[in-house]
Image (spheres, rainbow, N blue to C red):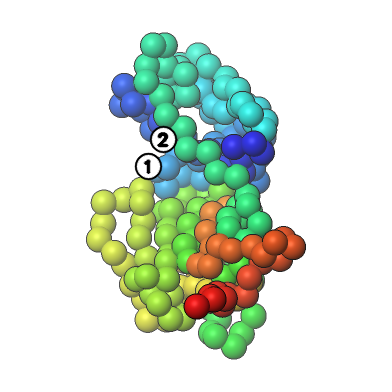
Amino acid sequence: LGTTPAAIFTKNRSDSVSWRCWHKDLTANNMLFFNSNNGETDPSSQGNGYIKTVGSSTYSVYQGTTDTNGVNGSSDNMIAYCFAEIKGYSKFGKYVGTGSTVNAYAFGPRIHTGFKPAWVMIKSSDSSGNWIIWDNKRSPVNLADNYLQPNADSEEGTSTTQGIDFLSNGFKIRNTYQDAGTGGDEYVYFAFAQNPFVTSSNVVSPAGAISLTG
C-alpha cells in the first residue's frame, strides 16, 4: 500500500473460521467478525488469534492458543484485504450515536469524510448489531433507505423513515437502528467517494463536478 492501512479484512481460505476485521478506531488488539453481529471483542481473552500491529508495509498477528487458524493457520491459504485512507477517495472512522429520530432538516450525527460518499458501511463496536451498507446506486436520492446486511442472508431491507443522507462532504445518520444510531453507542464506518478525484494541488473535487475538455 505504501501507507498504513486503516482497515483490514482477513480470512482463512482453507478452514471454516470467521472473517476477522481490524479497524484503526477499535480498541487495541480487538477485532470484529464480518460474519457476526457481535460488537468488538478481545480475541486473546478467548484464545483467538488477532491482528496485533499494523505498519506501512506489513502487519503482524498474534497466533492464539485455542482458535489458532483465524489469522495464521499453519500451511493454510490466507487472504487479506487492506484499505488505506486516500484523500478524496476513502475514509474510515467512528462516531457516537444519538438515539434521536431526525429528519432532513434536523441535526443528527454528521460524519465528515471530505467527499460525497457513494458507499458507506457501518458496524456498532459497542454492542450487537448487524453490519449495514447503504449506497447511491440502490438509493440515488436522499433519504438513502435501502440497505444490505452482509453478515446475514436476508434480502435487501428498506425504510421510508430511517436511513442516512449522503452529503457533499460526508453523511448524516437519520435513524435510531441499533445497527447505526443507538444513543451513546460507538460505531465504526467505512466510506468510499462518489467522485474520487483530487486536483493537481491536492484539493478534493466538488461532489459531482467533473471538468471535461472537448
Q: Residues within 10 Å of mark 1 (few under 14, many from 20)?
A: some
- In three-dimensional space, the C-alpha distance between marks 1 and 2, rounded to whole angstroms, equals 6 Å
Residue 23 screen position, x and y as percent: 59, 42
Disc number for residue 35: 1
Which residue sits furthest top?
74
Q: Amino acid at mark 2?
A: Trp
Seen at 53% across and 38% down, the residue is 82
Q: Is residue 54 left or right of residue 141?
A: right
Q: Residue furthest right?
A: 201
Q: Mark 1 and 2 residues: CB-CB less than 8 Å, in contact?
A: yes
Return the disc, 1 or 2, that comes first in the chain's sequence.
2
Residue ID at (43%, 53%):
131
Amino acid type, callout 1: Asn
Quadrant assignment, res 112: bottom right
Nearest the viewer among 129 and 1 is 1
Residue nearest the viewer, comparing 95 with 117: 117
Q: Which residue, given by chain and number where applicable, does mark 2 sit on?
A: 19
Q: Is residue 187 above or below residue 77?
A: below
